[in-house]
Image (tube, rainbow, N blue to C red):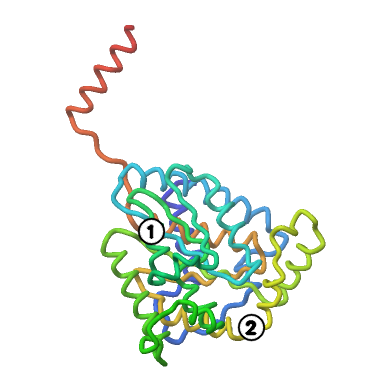
Amino acid sequence: MKMEELIERARKFSKPYRVCEGKGFRLKDVEPGDTSDFTAEEKPRAKEALAMGVEALSELQERLYAQNRWAVLLIFQAMDAAGKDGAIRHVMSGVNPQGCQVFSFKAPSSEDLDHDYLWRCQKCLPERGRIGIFNRSYYEEVLVVRVHPEFLQKQNLPPELVGKDIWKERFKDIRNFERYLARNGVVVCKFFLHVSKKEQKKRFLERLDNPDKHWKFSANDAKERAFWDQYMEAYEEMIRETATEQAPWYVVPANNKWFTRVVVAAAIIETMASLELKFPEVSKEKLKELKTVRETLLYE
């Protein structure tokens, strides 16, 4: 399949899951078990589509690196066991590690807490020509910190700055930050992997039943299920308040990992293709130099 055709297919495939204008967005309108026109029996076709997507991403990333004008920031947010790690691993499997950086943001350190909440993520922004991946991000500040107010207290903010509008203020800060990035050549593409509570329970039990997966499980992960409704409300408002044309959200059904990965790959292909990436043109002097080198090698 030609690159142009693949890009067009990716654009059509990812469009239903893209949110560029958050007003009126409702999380309940997105079915976690949705698989578009794929049926469970068509998983091999989905895997074939993913393989083609991985190959396309490899070529686009090579152009991104060579052109050295744009940077791409991919942000992944989700409840535990939604498949963030697997999506990143499978979708980015064909990308040259030299041009890709992955950062996972866990609970903030004491040093992080002594700075503004964007600080630790700002340090990890991708350079021009590279893809940066945030596995969780500054969005935790309007998610887990909102669901658990005690985490906000640990940030030692002046009391007069912690008012009733703090979440609106943080949404505004994030929109402004992402607008700033866009104006400086950093393209932001955000993913919320939407898994159901029932599917999360199933995956937790699978981890508990598999000794090789015990290292991935924390008792705290299960405790957070008690706050499921609060998290869903927080995610919904986050998307409503921060989905923009320059930094859209892709709300991806995540009950079927094989489908999630195809949607993520399609969205990244669409994002990178929109940059019209090209290899740098070589000057006449450089071509002349290369010709001389070639002749020297041939007659060596």
Q: Nearer the viewer, mark 2 or mark 1?
A: 1
Look at label 1 and name its amino acid. Answer: Lys
Which residue is at 42% across, 81% downward? 22
Name the secondary structure under disc 2: helix
In this figure, which residue is indicated by the disc labeled 2? 227
Q: For mark 1, what is the residue?
A: 123
Residues 190 and 119: in front is: 119
Taking the spot 52% from the left edge, 59% from the top edge, the residue there is 104
In the figure, is residue 82 to the left or right of 210? left
Across the whole image, how many numbered discs are drawn on residues?
Answer: 2
Disc with the residue nearer the chain's start (2 vs 1) = 1
For the residue carrying disc 1, how many other residues have a C-alpha within 10 Å: few (<14), some (14-19), or many (20+)?
few
Q: Position of residue 84 (x, y in %)?
A: 58, 62
Q: Nearer the viewer, residue 175 or 275?
A: 175
Could you say which is closer to the camera, residue 109 or residue 89? 109
Asked if residue 197 is positioned above or below residue 180 in the image, the reply reads below
Q: Identify the residue at horizontal 48%, vertical 43% (top origin).
A: 97
Image coords of residue 241 (percent x, y): 41, 81
**Helix, strand or loop at mark 1:** loop
Give the number of the disc on residue 280: none
Residue lying farthest to the top in this orientation: 300
Q: Is residue 149 left or right of residue 271?
A: right
Depicted 246 relative to depicted 290: above or below: below
**Residue situated in front as seen by the camera: 121 or 134:** 121
Amino acid at the residue labelled 2: Phe
Residue at image position (36%, 44%) is 65
Which quadrant of the structure image shows residue 245? Answer: bottom left
Q: Is residue 142 left or right of residue 66?
A: right
How far apart are the two marked residues, 2 and 1, measured between alpha carbons? 31 Å
x%, y% of residue 213? 74, 57
